Amino acid sequence: MPGDPYSRLLAGMMPFHNRFRMIYASIQGTLRQPHPQTMPQRQLLALLRQTLDLTHHLDGHHQIEETYIFPLLARRMPQFATTGNNGDTGHIQEHARMHAALEQLQSYAEGVERALRGSQGRKAISEGAGQPVAPEEAEGDQDDDADDAKRKPWPTSLFDSEHFRILIDNLGTTLFPHLEAEETSLRPSNIKAAGFTPEELARIPM
């Protein structure tokens, strides 16, 4: 209910978590369109920017949590501790597992962006990558009603949509279980059961 100190942490966390879910769904949707390998340059750059926005914000979000929020919660809730009896199930351990996938995705997106803006990208663009093909080249296309099918694909040495999709899917296997686990820990009933007082909760930045 409004003003309930035990609801404050979860209520403060949900906008961040929902934004991560929204950005992830948008990236995944772009990569699952019928012909992602042929997307226009502008759309490809937007995909890369969106991906890097997700990776940078997730990394920053985790740093803030582990520096300012988790140490205070860990006093009464072992799942927020860096060590203890929580084994591999703690939220910091979840962060660590996620960051392996996060770093792979970020590294690949940064590499594609660099290549796209460099000589390799200029060469691909000069050869028609991501641009409509001439009508005679598109005649044999079985899916000739789809605009994307009539574009020339990017060389996979510059951008491999299938590899990108695998990387974003890998991130999802750790991201979504972590978000749900953290939200469960922050439920008002669990915060109250841990023994926090309203005064203690007021000192936790959110």
Image: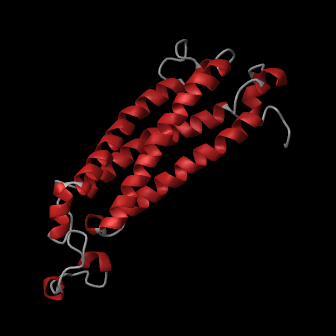
| Residue 185, image x, y percentages | 65, 30
| Residue 165, image x, y percentages | 33, 53
Res. 197 in view: no
Query: Going 67% across and 21% down the picture, which residue do you hit?
Result: 73
| Residue 89, image x, y percentages | 51, 24
Query: Going 21% across and 63% down the picture, which residue do you hit?
Result: 154
> In the rendered image of this protein, does residue 195 appear above or below residue 8?
above
The quadrant of the picture occupied by the N terminus is: top right
179 with respect to 185 (left or right): left
The quadrant of the picture occupied by the C terminus is: top right
Tally of numbered tags:
0
Res. 5 in view: yes
> In the rendered image of this protein, does residue 199 appear above or below residue 136?
above
Near-viewer residue (182 or 104): 104
Near-viewer residue (206 or 37): 206
> In the rendered image of this protein, does residue 67 appear above or below residue 159?
above
| Residue 132, image x, y percentages | 24, 79
The colour style of the image is: secondary structure
Query: Going 58% across and 39% down the picture, which residue do you hit?
Result: 180
Q: Residue furthest top?
A: 84
Residue 130 lies in what quarter of the image? bottom left
